């Protein structure tokens, strides 16, 4: 995840997840490694322009669509319910 969003440290991912929890976008699942659940439908989530641009750039580099890229990242990290 760290490399996927272009951060230098793993602690940055923790801060991003904490911010998403605080804003009510995700919920951490108890007793599940890497357990995360979206609390709003993806269409209801509003990503900043910078985040959207990063996802598009990463997807383009991977040769896929932004949605497919995010889906593959979630699958690779075992974050699917």
Image: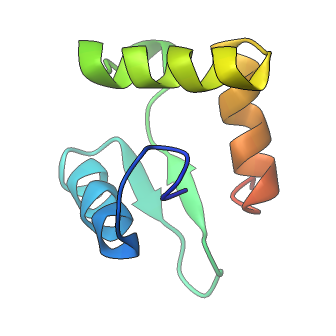
Residue 47 vertical placement versus 20 (above, below): above
In the displayed structure, does residue 58 sit left or right of residue 78?
Answer: left
Q: Residue at x 27, y 20 (%)?
A: 50
Which quarter of the figure has residue 32? bottom right
Looking at the rendering, in which quadrant would you find the N terminus? bottom right
Above or below residue 35? Residue 2 is above
Viewer-nearest residue: 78 or 45: 78
Specify the farthest residue to the bottom. Answer: 31
Residue 48, visible in the rendered structure: no
Give the mark count: 0
Q: How is the image coloured?
A: rainbow
**In the depicted structure, whether residue 48 falls above or below residue 10:** above
Q: State the image coordinates of residue 26 (x, y, percent, origin top left).
A: 41, 49
Q: Where is residue 44 shown, x and y percent of the image?
A: 40, 16
Indicate the quadrant containing the C terminus: top left, top right, bottom left or bottom right: bottom right
Give residue 58's quadrant in the image: top right
């Amino acid at each position: 995840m760290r490399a996927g969003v272009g951060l230098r440290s793993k602690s940055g991912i923790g801060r991003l997840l904490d911010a998403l929890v605080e804003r009510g976008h995700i919920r951490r699942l108890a007793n599940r490694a890497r357990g995360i659940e979206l609390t709003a439908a993806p269409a209801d989530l509003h990503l900043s322009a910078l985040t959207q641009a990063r996802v598009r750039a990463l997807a383009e580099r991977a040769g896929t669509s932004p949605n497919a890229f995010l889906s593959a990242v979630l699958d690779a990290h075992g974050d699917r319910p």
